[in-house]
Image: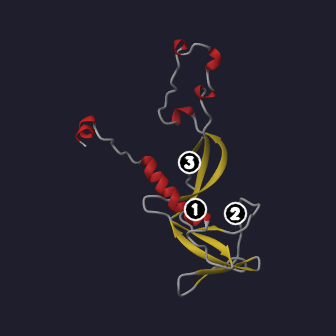
Amino acid sequence: MLAIQSTKQAGGSCTANVLPCRINHDGPVNASERFWDPLTGDDGKKLAYFRGRQIHGKTVKVPEGYRGAVLSKTDRLLPASSRAGGAEQDIEDDERDDEDERDDEDEPQQVKILEETASFDEFVVWEHDALPEDANDPYVKGVGEWMEFAQRAHSYTTSKSADERKQS
């Protein structure tokens, strides 16, 4: 499991960029305008050159009620006293027929801490030679699908009562 903690050194707000390449580096970069200088045209489309190739960008807003976060892995663990619920629940021996039936779920799980280094309310998805399309790009499409899934997973609908079912 993972827990997110904000740090005092958080970099504030940023614009995340999803590039159409794999970069085997996960730390800060001292990028000058010589290497990364995206332009925004009059029509709002973004254009940049990355390693000599032209790429086109589409800005995607994070839906209202949500926020994006840039996270950094740490080796720290969340103390058991800080977890939701606080106290571990004991399982009595008479609830189980056999000791061998105990699952690993009964043991306390380690909760690793991710530090929030910055936040964003929009990100730019870049694609080679053409603007990313909503229907084809997995990032653009995924934001809409994930938010819809999250809303449905967290919504509560009541079923008809027995009296209402008899009347219909």
| Residue 146 position in % (x across, y down) | 52, 56
* Discs 3/1, front: 3
Q: Nearer the viewer, residue 132 or 112?
A: 132
Residue appearing at x 43%, y 58% in the figure? 65
Q: Nearer the viewer, residue 141 or 76?
A: 141
Q: Determine crowd level at label 3: few under 14, some 14-19, many 20+ residues with C-alpha closer than 10 A.
A: some
Position of the N terminus, as image quadrant, is top right
The residue that disc 1 covers is 11
Q: Determine crowd level at label 1: few under 14, some 14-19, many 20+ residues with C-alpha closer than 10 A.
A: few
Which labelled disc corresponds to residue 28?
A: 2
* Discs 2/3, front: 3
| Residue 155 position in % (x across, y down) | 40, 48
Residue appearing at x 72%, y 59% in the figure? 26
41 lies above or below 84: below
Q: Assign a secondary structure to mark 3.
A: strand
Q: Nearer the viewer, residue 168 or 78?
A: 168
The residue that disc 3 covers is 4
Residue appearing at x 58%, y 73% in the figure? 133
Which image quadrant is residue 45 in?
A: bottom right
Amino acid type, mark 1? Gly
Which image quadrant is residue 159 in?
A: top left
| First in residue order: circle 2 vs circle 3 | 3
Q: Is residue 49 left or right of residue 84?
A: right
| Residue 19 position in % (x across, y down) | 67, 69
| Distance from Cα at disc 2 to Cα at disc 3 | 20 Å
Callouts 3 and 1 close, C-beta under 8 Å: no
Q: Assign a secondary structure to mark 1.
A: loop
Amino acid type, mark 2? Pro
